[in-house]
Each structure stands twice: as structure tokens, then as C-alpha cells.
Image: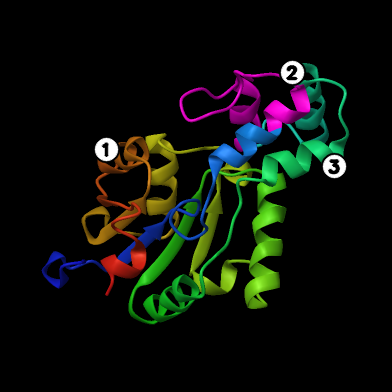
Amino acid sequence: MINSSEKIKNIIFDLGGVIINLDMDSTYAAFKRLANAAEVPLFNYTVQHEIFKQFEVGAIDTPSFLNGLRTLIGPVTDTELVDAWNAMLLDIPTERVALLMELKKRYRTFLFSNTNQIHFEGFNKILYDAHGLATLDPLFEKVYFSHTMGLRKPDVASFLQIIAENDLVPSETLFLDDTQGHLDGAKLAGLQTMLVSNENQIVDIFR
């Protein structure tokens, strides 16, 4: 639960695992099925092929990403690859949307997500189908995505850019993420941080 004595005025939220539920295993399993292999050592909890990082900072476009995946997985269609890559994207619970709308009235709120063009289109569709919102923009003062910034967490420069562009005081700014490494980068930029987990979700933190 957040402590009002911390004098938080600004909140930066991660997206995956914080606002939208994720199931990384579903994408990993989908890639294995497409490759017809017992293991596909290109994407899991501990390994991430360089192509995913390039896509995440916008260094390559969607066709290049899909063609790159084909060289790693085999001769499959774009649709099959997109469906497999989006398999990890689950739901955005109504109570989280309602919480974000309420918090925006009381704090300056921002979103910062390591993502990519395919997932961007995927979670916007989920958001629209479930909540009638075309994008996440109405829930925050400003949104930041790694593939349009050209920077990704935990790069300290990514946090410093958000701080500078919005005249934020780091000590008055809380960053919420479900990955400790990302929180470590935020701390180096002077932000206050809090780990989000299954046992410590944002609806619990701000209750």
C-alpha cells in the first residue's frame, strides 16, 4: 500500500504484468509448435534473441522482424508468427482501468512500456474490445513506448528522458514495474520504485 507521507506527486506505470496480464509461456509454447521442436532457444524467461531487442527499440520494422523470426523458426506465415507473438497478451481487468482513471485525477500519471509495434496493435485491440478505448492515452497524461522512443528499460537514459520532458522531480515520482532489473534502472535515475507482483498488484498498492 502506498504511504501518503512519501509525498508522491507523479506515478509511472509499466504495462505488461502491471496493467495487462501476461502469459509468456503461451508465446514460448506457440513458437515451439511452429518450429516443431522440443525447445526453441530464442525467447523465454531467461533468454531473448537479439532480434526481439532490436524490434523493441524500433531498430527494425515489423516485416524485418517477421522475416527474422522465419529464419529462426522455419517457413511459417506472418499470421502464424503474429498470433504466436501475441499469445502472451491476456486481459486488462476492469478494476485496473477504473483505478488508473481515478489516479489520474490525483496524480500526474505516465506509462512506460518496453514493447513493439505488433504488441502495440495487439493490446490496443484488447483494450478496445473490453473497454471501448482505442488506445491507452486517455488513462495517462502521457504514454511512452520503447519502440517509438528508441530506448528501453532498464536504460537510465530512458527514465531521464521522461523526467526531463515532463519536468518531474525524481524523488516525488514513483515507478511501478514487475521486473526488478527495470526498477534498478529507475533507482539510478533517482526515482522511487515499487515491485508489482501477483501478491502486490496495483489495486492493492493504491487501495
Q: Which residue occupies 46% across, 52% down?
A: 17
Asked if one can make out residue 134 in the rendered structure from this viewpoint, the answer is: no
- Look at the image and say whether residue 37 sits in the magenta stretch: yes
Question: Which label was assigned to residue 188?
Answer: 1
| Mark 3 or mark 2, earlier in chain | 2
**Mark 2: which amino acid?**
Leu
Magenta-colored span: 31-56
- Residue under pointer 3: 79
Q: Relative to residue 91, is residue 53 depicted above or below? A: above
Secondary-structure class at tag 1 = helix
The residue that disc 2 covers is: 72
Horizontal side of residue 91 vs 6, given as left or right: right
Q: Amino acid at mark 3?
A: Thr
* Picture quadrant of residue 24: top right
Left or right relative to 135: residue 107: left
Q: How far, Cα to Cα, is label 3 from label 2? A: 16 Å
